[in-house]
Image: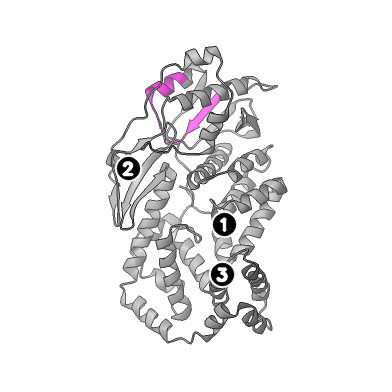
């Protein structure tokens, strides 16, 4: 059975773009199969670690690498260097949490948690509206939180009554603080990690152990990944409930002149976590003077899979980094159906978080159509700067260079929560 190719927006663009001209067809009549690679070579010996093994060979589709990761849950398929690095970091933190669970102090905390009366939590779960009403007096800020949480739990728009209970008892905040200080997404979609964070947070809340005390049980070196994320962003993730974070994300997007339609589409997209949507807003804030950002966010909001969503998130982060560190951007233009950045000096910046660019038929269609689209702009760019995060084959480099484009490969992703 043929492997299903990655459905990211770059591929979707290539498939739906215009037919090639005769000249373009002659230019791209020879193609190559993306090379298979040894996982240990690609990952510099980090293909195996606590609880995982990245299987060889590693294949690709001309844009991203496709990995198969063996864990105790079976084999998971991950598309892209970014998602793989994210998962490997989550596995590292999961291993650290499981080690923490064997520490005597943690076990004592579990015992204390077991002794704590649970009537309040139980009543919240079984009768969320009645319990919420009984806690309204003298609650302060939690008043607004519970009100919103109850409305959504009752209407089915958000978390379950059990999630509401976690918010009321402080367990949800403890989980967010622990996750952020460990450098992982509080809303991670990786269920084993989410469950381990939940258990640790319950010990912190009911077992009278602070998050700082819990972190003392974590093996040394685990906290280093948390460095590199802006403190204001980290604080917002910890102090904001999910609803508050989503509301703040929408506010910041509006400040960046993103349309209400796109904001609503992004908020409804299930392939981003709330923290990732907030990261998008945070990144846009750094270069909000660029015209046409709505096009960039609209493409992200249209993501139809997890790998596509993470690709778009990485692309936005890399575009912001390019604007800040390499050359200032003036606008984002829709070129042959794909958002492309135009620099203030008249050069086009094609910024892509690609892992391994190979000259396949799809690649040829995409780059040829982009080149034609740029040439057809009312004010065509003086040249094109193609920047990617990964490697490029000799054939792909030769073909793209023949378009007159400059090529920069192996551009590192900036430090931060996005890999």
What residue sits right under mark 3 in the picture? 160
Crowding around mark 3 (Cα neighbors within 10 Å: few <14, some 14 to 19, many 20+) is: some
Q: Which residue is mark 1?
A: 274
At mark 3, the secondary structure is loop
Q: Is residue 157 above or below residue 105?
A: above
One can see residue 220 in this view: no
Magenta span covers which residues?
A: 383-399
- Disc 3 to disc 1, C-alpha distance: 17 Å
The structure residue drawn at horizontal position 51% and vertical position 24%, both measured from the top left corner, is 365
Q: Which mark is residue 361?
A: none
- The image shows residue 26 at horizontal and vertical percentages of 48, 12
Q: Locate the N terminus by quadrant.
A: top left
Residue at figure coordinates x 31%, y 35% from the top left: 37
Q: Would you place residue 417 above or below residue 366 in this image?
A: below
Mark count: 3
Distance between the alpha carbons at the discs numbered 1 and 2: 29 Å
Q: Is 337 rendered above or below residue 88?
A: above
Q: Select label 3 or label 2 by which is in front.
A: 3
Q: Which residue is mark 2?
A: 43
Whether residue 25 is in magenta: the answer is: no
**Label 1: element kind:** helix
């Amino acid at each position: 059975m043929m492997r299903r190719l990655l459905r990211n927006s770059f591929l979707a663009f290539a498939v739906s773009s215009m037919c090639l001209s005769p000249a373009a067809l002659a230019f791209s009549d020879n193609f190559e199969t993306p090379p298979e690679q040894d996982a240990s070579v690609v990952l510099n010996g980090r293909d195996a670690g606590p609880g995982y093994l990245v299987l060889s060979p590693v294949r690709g589709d001309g844009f991203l690498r496709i990995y198969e990761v063996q864990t105790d849950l079976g084999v998971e398929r991950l598309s892209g260097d970014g998602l793989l690095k994210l998962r490997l970091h989550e596995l590292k933190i999961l291993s650290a949490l499981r080690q923490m669970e064997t520490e005597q102090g943690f076990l004592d905390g579990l015992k204390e948690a077991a002794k704590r009366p649970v009537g309040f939590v139980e009543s919240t779960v079984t009768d969320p509206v009645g319990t919420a009403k009984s806690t309204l007096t003298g609650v302060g800020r939690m008043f607004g939180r519970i009100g919103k949480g109850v409305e959504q739990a009752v209407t089915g728009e958000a978390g379950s009554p059990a999630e509401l209970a976690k918010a009321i008892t402080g367990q949800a905040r403890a989980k967010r603080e622990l996750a952020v200080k460990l450098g992982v997404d509080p809303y991670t979609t990786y269920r084993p990690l989410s469950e381990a964070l939940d258990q640790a947070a319950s010990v912190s809340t009911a077992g009278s152990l602070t998050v700082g005390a819990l972190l003392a049980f974590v093996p040394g070196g685990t906290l280093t990944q948390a460095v590199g994320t802006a403190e204001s962003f980290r604080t917002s993730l910890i102090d904001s409930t999910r609803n508050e974070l989503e509301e703040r994300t929408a506010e910041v997007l509006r400040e960046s002149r993103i349309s209400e339609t796109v904001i609503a589409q992004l908020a409804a997209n299930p392939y981003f976590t709330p923290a990732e949507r907030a990261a998008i807003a945070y990144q846009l804030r750094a270069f909000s003077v660029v015209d046409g950002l709505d096009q960039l966010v609209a493409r992200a909001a249209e993501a139809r899979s997890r790998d596509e969503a993470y690709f778009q998130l990485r692309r936005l982060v890399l575009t912001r980094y390019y604007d800040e560190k390499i050359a200032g951007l003036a606008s984002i233009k829709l070129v042959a159906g794909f958002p492309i950045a135009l620099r203030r000096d008249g050069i086009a910046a094609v910024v892509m978080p690609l892992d391994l660019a190979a000259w396949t038929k799809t690649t040829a269609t995409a780059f040829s159509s982009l080149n034609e689209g740029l040439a057809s702009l009312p004010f065509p760019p003086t040249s094109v700067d193609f920047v990617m995060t990964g490697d490029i084959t000799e054939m792909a480099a030769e073909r793209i260079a023949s378009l007159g484009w400059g090529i920069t490969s192996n551009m590192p992703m900036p430090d931060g929560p996005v890999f």
